[in-house]
Amino acid sequence: MQVFVTIVFVVIIGMHYVIYRRLAVAPRWPRRVRTAIGAGMVLLVILLLSSWRSLWAPVLSPDAARPLAWVGMSWLAFGLYLSLGLLVVAIVAGVLALRGSDPLTRVRVNRAGSLAALAGAAATTVWGLVSAANPEVTRWTVEAEQLPEQFDGTTIVLLSDLHIGAVNSDRLTRELVDAANAAEPDIVVLAGDLVEGSPNRYGYQLAPLADLEAELGVYAVTGNHEFISGEPQAWIDIWQELGITVLQNESATIEQDGAVLHIAGVHDAMGEGEWLADPQAALDGLPAGDFTLYVAHQPSQAEDAQGLGIDLQLSGHTHGGQLWPMHYAVLASQPMLSGRAMVGDVDVLTSRGAAAWGPPVRVGAPPEIPVITLTR
């Protein structure tokens, strides 16, 4: 975890260095303009880091701190696209320098390019903000010969990656619960990363989950952010108080008109010690040939569950990349971005997630609420 935090910190500092050099210095703006740019960036960095590390907690309530967190985190997405645009301008200016163009021409190019990069980053971020605020319902049909006739037509709503906390509030929780209930599911699966931060500060924001309506039950597993919080058991306790069945390396059997369907779940791959993901324990004792749903936060966890008789794995975690071009970084550690694919002998359906992590921005990976229909 410390290594991850260090890497993120270095990347953030490096991004801001690039922005300042290319936005303020290279165009040779007057000193007062450079000073204003530098001061603005310092303020935005403070908002970003304060929100990321929840430094507002001692003095501001979650609702009071949320606008500050929203601005700070949105700047992270804006800064990403501004950096990419400014790097293109730097390449163009570098080519002109190699071709011997005069300095005044390069200054003009840098000035025009920096303004164009600002406009492009603003347009992309606004588009991403709108996209992130409007999860779409995606529908999937999964056919299985071993599905009992009594479960033919069973519908499952998959909610993952809500990341309720400093940026996403109980208002989002309520909206997602309403959207899930509107689909009239038989089963609701919460595939981890429901939260960000401390349960003492943000736990109340999950309260609307108690209103999820599913005749055959609401089930959940942990995600990596439950472990990043440092208090996974406290979050699990809150979920259970809300009427959610938490699958902790275990399974539950759902009965309907004399037939059964099994749903098993494991902790996230980030868990250690007592929280270690154990697919063998989760699936232990389940009869071969029975239809088995398997819930694991990360699609890559299917690689540890080969040959165990899983009919369908439900996952999240990837966010579909969330911010292009981060898609490529996700694919470096996961076998898929989103949708449905075979991972070895396991059929995996991965949601892009219902919300966003960090910046409330999505570019090229809109949020979704998958509704899965099981058929024979």
Image: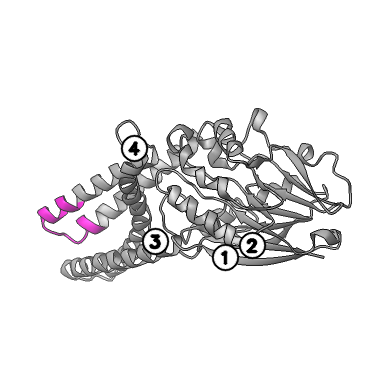
User: Viewed as shown, does residue 120 lie left or right of 303?
Assistant: left
Spatial CA span between label 2 and label 1: 7 Å
User: Viewed as shown, does residue 270 lie left or right of 11?
Assistant: right
Q: Dots 3 and 2: beta carbons under 8 Å?
A: no
Q: Secondary structure at mark 3?
A: helix
Q: Please give the residue where the numbered disc 2 appears in the rendered image.
A: 371
Residue 94 visible in this rendered orientation of the protein: no
Q: Please give the residue where the numbered disc 4 appears in the rendered image.
A: 61
Q: Is 41 located above or below residue 6 in the figure?
A: below
Callout 1 amino acid: Val
The numbered dot on residue 137 is 1
Residue furthest right as drawn: 288
| Residue positioned 22% across, 70% down in the render | 112
Magenta residues span 23-37
Residue 33's x, y, as percent? 14, 56
Residue furthest top as drawn: 273
Q: Earlier in the sequence, mark 3 or mark 1?
A: 3
Spatial CA span between label 3 and label 2: 24 Å
Q: Please give the residue where the numbered disc 3 appears in the rendered image.
A: 129
Q: Nearer the viewer, mark 3 or mark 1?
A: 1
Q: Dots 2 and 1: beta carbons under 8 Å?
A: yes
In the rendered image, residue 26 lying in the magenta stretch gets the answer yes
